[in-house]
Each structure stands twice: as structure tokens, then as C-alpha cells.
Image: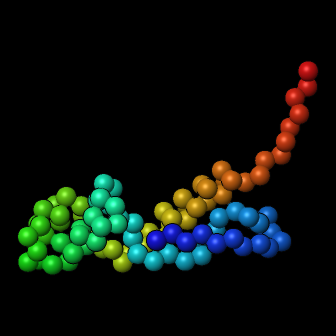
Amino acid sequence: MIKLEKWFDNTTTEGLPLLLEATGRCPPEDVGGASGYAEYLDAISDPTHPEHEQMRLWGPEQFDPNVVDRRALEAAVNTLSEIWKPRRLTTRSK
């Protein structure tokens, strides 16, 4: 889950995204939305589930939904900050 909050302060990061907290791991690519991710989690966590082995082979190796890749998330947020950072207007000379 991603939660964006607007936070104002007197620093150079005012109005830019900042990662405050992260919980859980992003779903694998092409998992089928929220309901597909829920089904995927059910299947990989239950060895008796009919699709357990197929989902373990399909998804990322050693997938743990509770592990957060904070560095990757911070890098993504920092990329957004760079994109959203106000730019100085420059005038073109004729």
C-alpha cells in the first residue's frame, strides 16, 4: 500500500514526496490486481492449496510478502522527487 500525505516544512523538500514508512512487499508483476494478489498469497502460504506449486514456480523465488525493499522504494520516491522538483524558469534570448 502506498499512502501519500502532504507535508509542509521550511526545507528544500517542501511539497516533494518523502518515504516515511513502508509495510509489506509489492505484488509480483501481472498477478491480477488486488484479488489476484490475495489468491496468490493464499496459494503460496498453503502447501495443500491446489495451485501452491504452480504459484511458487510462477512467482519470484523466495517471495516473502512481509519483506520490504526499503532501498528500492526510497529510490522510486527519490525519482518522483526529482521529476516533481520545481525548475527555474529560463528565458530564451532571441
Q: Quadrant of residue 66?
A: bottom left
> Can residue 62 be seen at all in this image of the molecule?
no
The mark tally for this picture is: 0
Tell me where residue 67 appears, x and y as whole percent: 38, 75
Q: Residue furthest right?
A: 94
User: Residue sitting at 30 percent across and 67 percent down?
Assistant: 35
Who's the residue at 39% across and 66% down the image?
Answer: 26
Identity of the residue furthest to the front in this view: 35
Q: Quadrant of the C terminus?
A: top right
Q: Quarter of the image holding residue 62?
A: bottom left
Residue 55 visible to an observer of this rendering = yes
Left or right of residue 79: residue 62? left
51 relative to 79 in the view: left or right: left
Q: Is residue 29 above or below residue 50?
A: above
The x and y percentages for residue 52 are: 13, 69
Name the spot of residue 16 as percent of width and height, x first.
70, 62
Identify the residue at image location x=72%, y=73%: 7
- Residue at 12 percent of width and 67 percent of height: 51
From the viewer's perspective, is residue 89 above or below residue 38?
above
Q: How is the image coloured?
A: rainbow
- Residue 23 lies, with reference to residue 17, above or below; the image says below
